[in-house]
Amino acid sequence: MDFGIGHGEIWIPPPVLLHESAPTGFASPPPPRGGLTRSEFTVARRVLAGYTAREIGALLSRSPRTVESHIEGMKSRLGCGSRAELIAALIALGVEALR
């Protein structure tokens, strides 16, 4: 792909804008799994990485209570009674921790 810069402007070719063939690092995140919403999926990847609700909230510009709501929603949807069960269920679904 040819990215051109001229006169202080950046030209981005249409395929990149449409995410059809985005360069590495610009691709859209994988779709949610297990019926999780996109927000829950984003939180799930950080839960798997060991972040607390407060840390996740700070990273995503959300309140810790909002993050806890996402975690509770995932636990309910996946039939989990604890955070440990949620982590096991997310791993079984193939959700990968954010590195």
Image (tube, grey):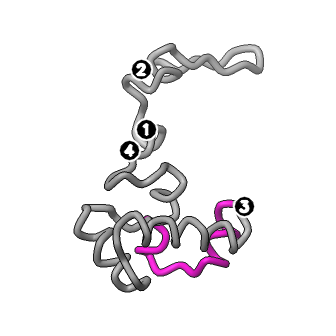
User: Which residues are the magenta region?
Assistant: 45-60
Asked if marks 1 and 4 touch (Cβ < 8 Å), the reply is no
Residue labelled with disc 2: 1
- Measured as percent of width and height from the top left, residue 12 is found at 57, 19
Amino acid, disc 4: Pro
The residue depicted at 54 percent of the width and 54 percent of the height is 39
Q: CA distance from mark 3 to mark 1?
A: 22 Å
Q: Main secondary structure of the magenta part?
A: helix
Q: Secondary structure at mark 1?
A: loop
Q: CA distance from mark 1 to mark 4?
A: 12 Å
Residue labelled with disc 1: 27
- Measured as percent of width and height from the top left, residue 11 is found at 61, 17
Magenta stretch containing residue 90, yes or no?
no
Amino acid, disc 1: Ala
* Chain-order first, disc 2 or disc 3: 2
Q: Quick check: 64 above or below 40? A: below
- Measured as percent of width and height from the top left, residue 52 is found at 57, 81
